[in-house]
Amino acid sequence: EVIVGDFLRKYVKKNGGFLLNDRAIPGTKQNIDHILITEKAVFVIDSKNHSGKLTIRNEVNKTQIKEILYLDRFSQVKLVDKMKSQVKVVDASLKDGGFKVETVGYLIFYGVQWPKDKKPTQVDGVLINGNGANSPIQDIKTKKKVDVLAVGEYLTANFQAR
């Protein structure tokens, strides 16, 4: 979390944006590691320090093929689902505030085996990066420009620091 937070602070200093770290999810004991607001999107970021081989596998379930994230032989569906639920909470809050912005879930892993040249990959709507905090942020294409300050102040008020 600290390494990713440092990277994101440097990113904001260089590229602009608004960063919130370690935010409580209202009404729960859960937290969001980082929320990064850029002119392109709002990123809900969770960082993990694990060991083992991180892979994405196609699995067939009846007539559907689905990509599943694995750490060694253990499915990480719960981790991806948790990220999706955090995105949903932030997205709902933004909609309640009248903001129409793209909200992106991003899982950043440290200490895992993952090809060094592999770019962040999407699994079930969540960006996955096994190479730590390098930045796919510039690669996001959106239709609307985000009012960074207004969204940042709104999220600061609605997701309290822990």
Image (cartoon, helix red, strand yellow):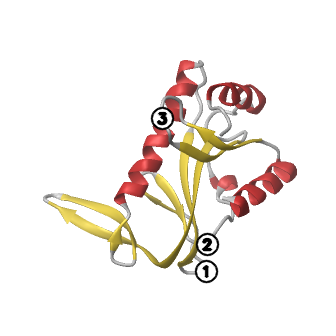
Name the residue type under label 3. Thr
Q: CA distance from mark 3 to mark 2?
A: 30 Å
Looking at marks 3 and 1 on the same chain, the residue that comes earlier in the sequence is marked by 3
Quarter of the image where the N terminus is located = bottom right
- The residue beneath circle 1 is 116
x, y percent for residue 28: 48, 35
Which secondary structure, mark 1?
loop
Which secondary structure, mark 3?
loop
Q: Are marks 3 and 1 in contact (CB under 8 Å)?
A: no
Q: Which numbered disc, 3 or 2, marks the residue closer to the eye?
A: 3
Mark 2 surroundings: few (<14), some (14-19) or many (≥20) residues within 10 A: some
Q: Which residue occupies the foreground of this view, 41 or 155? A: 155
- The residue beneath circle 3 is 28
x, y percent for residue 52: 47, 80
Q: Are marks 2 and 1 in contact (CB under 8 Å)?
A: yes
> Image point 82% across, 50% down: which residue?
15
Q: Are marks 3 and 2 in contact (CB under 8 Å)?
A: no
* The disc label shown at residue 135, or none: none
